[in-house]
Image (cartoon, rainbow, N blue to C red):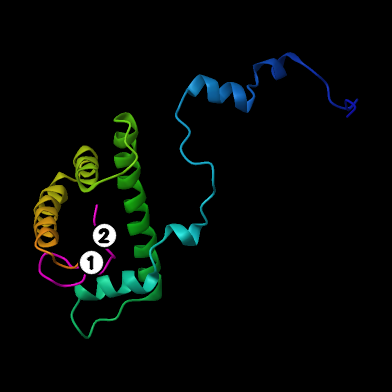
Amino acid sequence: MSASPSKAEGPHEEDVQSPETEDKEQEQPAMYEFEVKEQDRWLPIANVARIMKTALPENAKIAKEAKECMQECVSEFISFITSEASEKCQQEKRKTVNGEDILFAMTSLGFENYAEALKIYLAKYRETLSRGGESRSGPSGSTAGAGSSSN
């Protein structure tokens, strides 16, 4: 490749850092090198709508815009909490995020009121599993709407 004569080199170019220099200075651990499509980050809109309907009167309707907004919000919330939990796992040199990591993340991010309720739910869920209950059933025996799974 030949140098372009129209490009003037000046002192301002010396101040520009290359991406490699920036990476070395930040010294952050590399997370993931793959790109996730936006629709793959979101929960299915049908699942979001079903959960929303459980909180509304039977004859209530939900606008498409409201479902889409909620879909984006809950997906971002899950990413936010999971990222914090994952950071804790990395610091402790573990690869698996568990329920306690999620509860820790929620508490450290200011959602302690929710974390307390979920702590009780998690204990009941694990009790159900230890008694031989189905892995996708909640503590009350009903199937979890958001696709819960064991740790």
**Disc 1 secondary structure class:** loop
Q: Is residue 147 above or below residue 106?
A: below
SS state under label 2: loop
Question: Where residue 136 is drawn, which disc sits there?
Answer: 1
Depth check, front residue: 62 or 46: 46
Say which quadrant the N terminus sits in.
Answer: top right
- The residue furthest front is 132
Mark-to-mark CA distance, 1 and 2? 6 Å
Q: Is residue 39 left or right of residue 106?
A: right
Give the side of residue 66 with respect to residue 28, left or right.
left
Apparent side of residue 132 relative to residue 70 in the rendered image (left or right): left
Horizontal side of residue 37 vs 123, given as left or right:
right
Q: How many marks?
A: 2
Q: Residues within 10 Å of mark 1 (few under 14, many from 20)?
A: some
> Quarter-wise, where is residue 11 in the image?
top right
Residue 65's spot in the image, x, y percent?
40, 71
Which segment is the magenta one? Answer: 135-151
Q: Which residue is mark 2?
A: 149
Which percent across, then down, holds residue 88?
29, 35
Q: Position of residue 16 (x, y in %)?
A: 65, 21
Q: Amino acid at mark 2?
A: Ser
Determine contact: label 1, label 2, CB under 8 Å. Answer: yes
Q: Nearer the viewer, residue 133 or 116?
A: 133
Instruction: Give the mark nearer the N terminus: 1 vs 2.
Output: 1
